[in-house]
Amino acid sequence: MITKHKSMRMNIRILLIGLGVMSGIFSSCGQTSEMDSLYNDGPYIFFENGHTVARWIEDNQVKADTLETGEPLKLNATVSASFDPAFLKTDYSFQPERQDAFTGVSHFVAVSYIHGQYGMLKKLLQVHRVIDEGGNWIYGTGHLVIVGDVVDRGDEVTEILWMIHKLEQQAEKVKGKVHYLLGNHEIMVLKGDLRYIHKKYRYTSAGLKMSYQDIFSVNSYLGRWLRSKPVAISINKTIFAHAGFSEQYLQLGLTNKELNKTFREQIFDEPEDSVLANPMLNILYNDLGPVWYRGYFAEDFTEDRARAILQKLGKKNIVVGHTSFSGVVTRYRHKIIGVDSSIKFGKTGELLLYEKSAFTGVC
């Protein structure tokens, strides 16, 4: 099954790369000719010919620094609201998480569909005491689940990525956990479908002289980090995925571990034609798969179907994003919970909270 949005991807990718590289947005000195005001972006870190090179945009200027072992990246604080060089992993390798099921978790929060709204996400996490005013982890042994779609649409994507990168390390130190599940938009970026990126990142692509997809390639720090992330996890009796688990997907009989490994090894960096030609990968990658499915909120979906899916999964609740509402929504006595609260508009948002063995949606 080839869906309409996927058959268009290759042409769209070619068009957007052309817009970024050929339009002359940046002059040879690295300044923008079309930006209305100064802007900053980055840093982005690349592995090139045995060297580790950081590049960023500072007041419309492209800057770079070759990183030496033991020496921190020297970056003006105005470039990024969230980047902290102290949290860069010096071995530059990211092993996929070994664990995909967590038990005995007393409290967690879940959020999705952030789409570059760093300010809104930071405010929500501060209000509910997940982070402090300085953006540092204060949620103790709790878990934060980001149910996909951090990238695209908004203009503070890089800030969110570096914030998550720091928080997951801070949480680990106190036996907490940050789970960043990949959504359809993360996978679109990894595979070169760039139709939803904010214009700011077209300027960045032109300045760095590479496509946005290549900025997140396997030869980049953030690219390797993203590729280590899962598509699905479970906490206690709740299972999480960006879009959900259809009956057709369940017929494949995959465990979460197998699902996450399949995306990493057979989808992220493989040609789309070969993915679509494989019947199993086609289901994972299309509208019946865990990053695109919207069936739970369709008019013909029933509680009996929800109960049967949960029985097959061996869980009591499914938490998803992907389908937008004005707040956190539940169906069938919390069997299905949707956490896409339209944060992408930057006006309001909600978190799903679990504590004292109960779920709560909070503004």
Image (cartoon, rainbow, N blue to C red):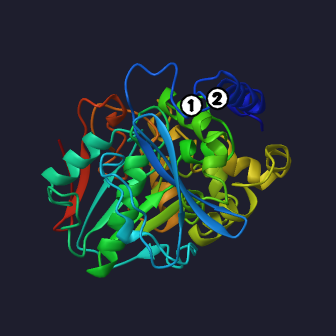
- Residue sitting at x 79%, y 44%: 272
Q: Which residue has dot 2 on it?
A: 20
Q: Element type at marker 2?
A: helix
Decide if residue 328 is in sight here. no
- Element under disc 1: helix
Nearest the viewer among 68 and 273 is 68
Q: Which residue is mark 1?
A: 202
**Placement of the N terminus among the 4 image quadrants:** top right
Give the image location of residue 224, x and y in percent: 60, 63
* x and y, in percent, of residue 345 in the image: 33, 28
Instruction: Report whether 2 appears left or right of 30.
Output: right
Please state which amino acid type lies under the numbered disc 1.
Answer: Arg
- Mark positioned earlier in the residue sequence (1 or 2): 2
Amino acid type for the residue under numbered disc 2: Gly
Q: Residues within 10 Å of mark 1 (few under 14, many from 20)?
A: many
Pinpoint residue 77: horizontal percent, then vertical percent: 30, 52
**Pointers 1 and 2 in contact (CB under 8 A)?**
yes
User: What is the CA distance from the residue labelled 1 to the residue labelled 2?
Assistant: 5 Å
Which residue extends farthest front? 29
Q: Residue at x 73, y 55 (%)?
A: 269
